[in-house]
Amino acid sequence: MALYKFTPPSIGRNALPSFWDLIALSLVIGAIALMANGARVTTVPLLGLNVTPLSLDPANLPIYALRSILRMLLAIVFSLIFTFIYAAVAAKSRRAEMVLIPVLDILQSVPILGFLTFTVTFFLNLFPGSVLGAELASVFAIFTSQAWNMTFSMYQSMRNQPKDLEEVTASFHLSGWQRFWRLDVPFAMPGLVWNTMMSMSGGWFFVVASEAITVGDTTVTLPGVGSYVALAIKQQNILAIFYAVIAMLVVIILYDQFLFRPLVAWADKFRFETTSSGIAPTSWMLDLFRRARITRYLSAPVALIAPLIWNLQIPSLRLGSGKPNPVASPAIDWIWLGLVVTPSLCLRRTPTAPRLNQIR
């Protein structure tokens, strides 16, 4: 099962751009310009945030909304990378699953402020005097609200694959790397896209805490919809909050039409069903890029490199795989659990515990 089949674009007849080509090219150039404008401000000094303080003028909301959506999209990219690595290791290794899944369940229950207490200082010291450190701290805070849902979705899809598909990959003698890109990712794609939409929506609940950061004596206010709402609440400006809600509604509609609806329609071809499904999802944006010939020219480098990457002969890490020894396997499991539990027991017996009891 291939993710994409590339056919070289023909340059003979009909070489002139069509109406669909002009629209697609305009959208691509506009998206690149917006991302470049949003990335440009991350290189300014951190003191520049005090020189141009946040304003409740609704005319500033478009640029604030742009910066917020770029942070959320960057967090989605990091969440996707984290999902592929973490879910693959947890699904392929039984002993890793015994540790990684409980840890993931615990981490998703930690409040976002619990992460901000140490990540803000870390990123600010990593890029001292630059807005980039504060931006990365904000992206990481949004990442903590998105990654867990996507990872659990990918993990469940990899664990619930039909046996006949696994037999097909075994008959073709695919390596672990090839199986991941030809079976695991395509099979998980429909559910992963829907959970990515849910994670993106959940990120809106954390934009206030991630853009108006206050940890101890450190206060960083990044321009964005979240910090705009925080300032409006502080000044009790109900009209400004209304403007922010309208801006968020417009942004949600835009990225739904331009990003997620095309992804849902594209991922529907990977759906594995034994019975006929209902009406297939459609997207005018996806139809537009399919009709535009320029899309094939722009995606040609990626379409040529991508198959070379996911067809690499990289062997899989068979941790705990094969036919388990009924005697050695339980013993190794107990040793593994002992190695995992022992450090936590040692931490409880630190010398600080008696002093804490005396203070109480």
Image (cartoon, rainbow, N blue to C red):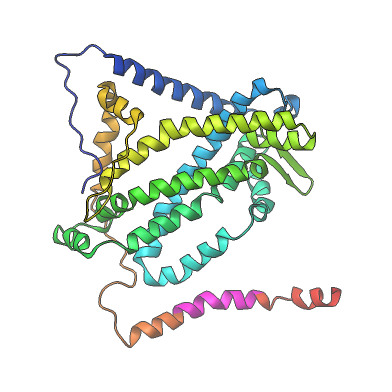
Is residue 345 magenta-colored? yes
In screen coordinates, is 128 left or right of 327? right
**Residue 310 x/y as whole percent:** 27, 47
Q: Is residue 254 visible?
A: yes
The quarter in which the C terminus is drawn is bottom right
The image shows residue 112, relative to residue 338, as above or below, that is above
User: Which residue is at the front of the view, 190 or 253?
Assistant: 253
User: Looking at this view, is 39 or 80 the one in front?
Assistant: 80
Seen as rendered, the residue at the extreme right is 359
| In this picture, residue 133 sits left or right of residue 351 | left
Whether residue 318 is in magenta: the answer is no
From the viewer's perspective, tell me whether residue 141 is left or right of residue 177: right
Question: Which of 350/51 is in front?
Answer: 51
Q: Which residues are magenta?
A: 336-347
The answer to whether residue 217 is above or below residue 227 is below
Residue at the image point whose x is 24% and y is 42% from the top? 308
Report the residue at 50% width, 77% height from top: 339
33, above or below 153, in the image: above
Where residue 341 sits in the image (x, y, percent)? 54, 77
